[in-house]
Amino acid sequence: MTMANFTLVVTSPPFDNQGSESALSFADALLAKGHMLNGVFFYQAGVHHANGWQTPPNDEMNPFKRWSALASQYRFPLHVCITAANRRGLLEEDNEVVEGHNLLSPFLASGLGQLVELCEDCDRVVQF
Amino acid sequence: MSAQFGLLFRSAPHGNANGQEALDLALVAGTFGQDVALFFLDDGVFQLMKDQHPEHIGRKNYSRTFAALEFYDINQIYVCQVSLNERGLHSADLCIEAEVLTSEQWQEKVADCQHILSF
């Protein structure tokens, strides 16, 4: 089987609709099949995935933890558009607005240029 | 000419952030020297309407920024003829020059894009 290198773009919010779960399942499946994932880019309402303060009930999915675990297992970066994130109240470490931050590692504060670079470097871009 | 990036604008402006954030992405991709094509279809054709005044509903008038696309070397701007017709619009209603495509031309142009993102 030919291996492909994927970039995933997540513009769906966590919790509100199925896009979030579909993105995780797709990432799980492609990595299990031995394909490459050069990175995931979170944009629009998808930036809420990076909110480390999200606290769903214990018997529900926690997208922040699921992505964090997958990224650490397979070593791919989780990039977040910082402009889209700041608009939505997600603030990175050492921001100048409030003490503390909710955009937590392993999610990375990035720019749209990073999305362009990921796409340049992959075979397939899939958006959720 | 084939494009590296095809960005689909499918939503009407101001009711959600799709158009503004797609345009932001287009400008960054242009800055990075990417070959970008913009496609306006369905209610997305309203993005290009002339004389928008969204400040009355507390939204930024980013439609002015479409005029700056040429300075980012983004010249492939396509509008779906069927979508225009369905909404009673004409190319003269649009705030920038755009190529109006039939369904067949549309399919060819979209198929030419290496990567597609939809907003």
Image (cartoon, coloured by chain):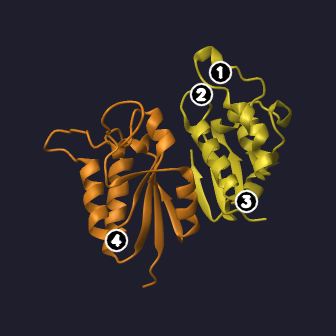
Q: At label 2, which amino acid type do we have?
A: His
Q: Which subunit holds the residue at mark 4?
A: A
Residue denoted by label 1: B54
Alpha carbon of mark 1 to alpha carbon of mark 4: how far? 44 Å
Left or right of B43? Residue A101 is left
Query: Between marks 1 and 3, how big is the CA–CA gap?
Result: 31 Å
Q: Colour of chain B?
A: yellow
Secondary structure under the numbered disc 1 in the rendered image: helix
Judging by colour alone, the chain drawn in orange in this rendered image is A
Disc 3 target residue: B109
Name the residue that disc number 2 marks.
B14
B119 vs B31, nearest the viewer: B31
The answer to whether any part of residue A34 appears in the image is yes
Q: Secondary structure at mark 4?
A: helix
Give the labeled residue for mark 4: A31
Residue B15 badge = none
Q: Is residue B49 above or below residue A63?
A: above
How far from the left and from the top, in percent, is residue A103?
A: 35, 43
> Splitting the image into 4 quarters, where does residue B14 fall?
top right
Contact flag, marks 2 and 1 (Cβ < 8 Å) = yes
Looking at the figure, which quarter contains the N terminus of chain A? bottom left
Residue type at the position of mark 1 = Pro
Q: Say what secondary structure mark 3 lies in.
A: helix
Helix, strand or loop status at disc 2 = loop
